[in-house]
Amino acid sequence: MFDAEKRGMIGLVRGDSPIHATSLDQLKRVLDPLKDTGQPNLVLDLRRVPLVDSAGLEYLLDAFDACRSQGGTLKLLSPTPLVTEILQVTGVSSFFEIFTDEVAAIGSFTK
Amino acid sequence: MLMLLQPSRDLDAPRRVIALHLLSGLSSVALLTFGIVQVVLSLRMEHLDSSAMTMMTKGEALIGADFRHRQGERTASLLDRFNAEYHLQHCAVIGPDGVYIAHSTPALIGSTAMESTGTLNQFGEVEKHTAQTPQGRSLLLYRTPIRQGEEIVATLEAAAWPQEWWTTAISAFRHGLLFILLGVAFLTAGGYFLFCVVRPMSAIEHQLRRAAIEELGQISLESVPATSLPSIGWNKLVDEQVRRVGRQDLESKVAAGLRSHREKRSEAILRSLTDGIALTDHEERITFANPSLQGIVATGEDDVLGRTMDEVIHFAAGSAAALRFNDPLYRSQQVVAEMGKEGDMTKGVLRISRVPLIASSHDASPSHVWMVRDVTQQKLADQMRNQFVYSATHELRTPLANIKAYAETLANMKAIDIEKQKDFCNTINSEATRLSRFIDDLLSISRMETGAMSLQKHETDMMRLFEEVIGKVRPEMDGKGILFNVLIPAKLPRLYVDKDKMTITLVNMLGNAAKYTPEGGHVSFEVEWNEQSIEIHVIDSGIGIAQDEIAKIFDKFFRSNDPRVRDRTGSGLGLSIAHEIVRLHGGKMLVHSELDRGSKFTVILPTA
C-alpha cells in the first residue's frame, strides 16, 4: 500500500509493498497525480519496499522522466539493501539521487 | 525529328544546326525531285511532239498515197495502225467539209470534227491545237493537210492525251523512289552523325544557359561525353568546379553542423535546468520557455509562447516587484524580486530574475532572459527553522530560567520555610521534566525523520492501555474543571501495538484537548471497533483550529497563529510525532475542527 503526503511543496510517497507488475497500479494511483501537476518535486520512500522488479524499474524511470520534463525531479529515499543492489546492478541508480535521510532528501530541494 | 523542326527560341544551337541541316536537306531533295519531274515532263512532251511529227509526216504520206491511188480504201486500217503504234487517243481524217470521213473509232465517221480551242504550235504544216472532249478533258490535236497536187483534199488528225504533271510525278516516283529514299536515308544518317558530334555541345550549352538564368550556386555542372577536345576541356572545368564546390560544401556543412550542434546543445542545457528560463523579445513577448517554466506556471508551451511574463506569472498589481519589472528605468538592468504564485503568496513563492540579453543590452527595448525559481520550499524551510528556533528558545529558556531562579533562591536565601523549599523543588522538578519531555520530542522527531523510529509491537490489552492514558490526563482535566467523558466498550480486542508509543500518542491528543479547552468545557474519549479497525475519538469543546491551518497541524514545529495557542507553551512537535506513530502502526489520524466550536481527532488502527 502506498500513500502520499506533502512536505511543504515536496511530495513524499511512502509504501510498504513491493513495486512489481501486479502491485504497480497502487503506486501509480498515488504517484501519477503528483507527477502530472506543476513542477513535480517528489521523494519516493523505499524504506519498507522489499522488492522492485523490471516493471517497477521501468515505471520509476518513466516517472523520473515525466518529472524532469516538467522541471521537477524524483528522488529515492533509503532503499533496502536488496532494492539498492537491484538499482545498482541494473544501472537505474545512476539516474536517481538516493538519500538515506528523510531530512536530507526533503532539504535537498531547498539548496 | 518533329521536335527538332519545331521553331523555338529555346532550342539550343546544336539542335538548331541539325534541324537546319535536315530542313535544307529535305528541301534540296524535294526541289531536286520537283526538277526531275519537270525535266521528265518536258522530255515526255518533246517525245510526244516528236512522235506526233513522225506519225503525221508518215501518215500524210501513206494516207495521201492511199487517197490518190486507192481512193482511201486502206485509210481505216492505217488509222488503226497509227493509233495503236503511237498510243493516240484517236486518229482520223477530216474531209473538206469538216466532217470525219475516216476515224479510228468508226462510230464517229460522219460526225463533225473536234473544235480546236487554241493553237499551240506549228511545225511546218503540222499544227498543234488544244481541244476538249465532251467529258471536259483536255486533248492535244495534231493536224496536217493531205494534198493532191496543190489541192488540200483532207486533213489528218491525231489526238493524244497531254502529259499531266502529277502523272509524270507518280511515274517519276515510281521509277526513282529508291533513289529518293536513299537520299532521305543519307540525309537522316548525316543528321544522326551530326547529332552525335554536337550532342556534347548541346549539353554544354544547356548548362551555360542555366548558368545565365539561375544563381551559380544553385546549379550543378555535369560532365559531357568526351567525344571532342571542347568536351574534354569542359569536363576538366566541371571537375575543378565540383572539387571547389565540394570543399565549400564540406566547409559550410561542417560549419552548419557545428552551429546546429551548439544551438541544440544550448537548448538541451536550457531545457534540462530545473529553474524556469524564458526569453522575451523587445515587446516583452515570450519567444522561448523551457519545460521547468511551464511546470512552475502549470501550463503548456503553446499557452506560454507569444504571451507576456505578466500574463503568465500574474504580477500582483501594485506590488513592489510588479512596479520594478514594469518600470522602464529598470529595463536595462538586472531585476530580482520575489512574488506569490499567481500574485498570491499563499499559493507559493517565486523568485524571479530578469536580465537584459547581452546582445541587446544597449538597446532602448532590449530582449530579456527571465529566470524563475519556485522557492516555496525554501521559504517553508526558513519559516520552519525560525519556528524551531523560536520554539526551542522558548521551550528551553523558560524552564531553564525557572530552574535557575528557584535554584538561586534556594542557594542564596539563608532561611526558607521547609514547605517553600518543597514547592521550589517541585517547580524545579516539573520544569526539568518539561525540558526532558521537549528533548524526548526532539529525539523522537529526529528518529522519525531519519527513519530510525521503530516500533516494539506486542499483544496489548487495549483496555489497560486506555485506562493508563486516562489516568495520566485526568488530573489535568480535573484541574481545569473540564467535564471528561469516557466511552469505551466493555469488550475490546487485543492489538499488536507499541504500547509506550501508542500511550504517548493518546496522551498527546488528550493533553492537547485539555490544554486548549477552556475551563468548564468538556472533552470526550470514545472508542468503537469492528472486525477491521478500532477507532479512537478525542472530542473537545476547545478553541478549534482555523480551516487554513488544519492541513499544517501535523507539520513539525507548527504552531497556530491563534494568540490563544501562542500564549500556551508547546513545541509544535506533539501531533507530528503522534501522526507518525499512528502511520507506523498502519493506521491513520483524521481531524475535524471548527474554530471556537471544538475539534475531533480520530485515530483508526487496523485490528488485523
Image (cartoon, grey):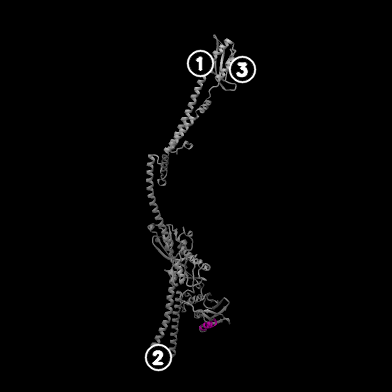
Chain of the residue displaying label 1: B
In the structure shown, which secondary structural element does the residue marked by tag 3 occupy? helix
Please give the range of residues in magenta.
B462-472
Q: Is residue B110 above or below residue B299?
A: above
Q: Which residue is mark 2?
A: B415
> Counting residues from the N terminus, which is met first, the one under dot 1 or under dot 3?
3
Assess whether mark 2 and mark 1 are in contact (beta carbons under 8 angstroms): no
Q: Is residue B272 visible to the viewer in this orientation of the structure? A: yes
The numbered disc on residue B199 is: none
**Image location (x, y in percent) of residue A66:** 48, 64
Q: Is residue B578 above or below residue B94?
A: below
Q: Nearer the viewer, residue B441 or B54?
A: B54
Majority SS type along the magenta span: helix
Direction top: furthest residue: B149
Q: Is residue B135 above or below residue B245?
A: above
Q: Is label 2 on the same chain as label 3? A: yes
> Counting residues from the N terminus, which is met first, the one under dot 2 or under dot 3?
3
Assess whether mark 3 and mark 2 are in contact (beta carbons under 8 angstroms): no
Mark 3 neighbour density, 10 Å: few (under 14) some (14–19) many (20 or more): few
Looking at the picture, which amino acid does disc 1 mark? Answer: Phe
Q: Which residue is mark 1?
A: B123
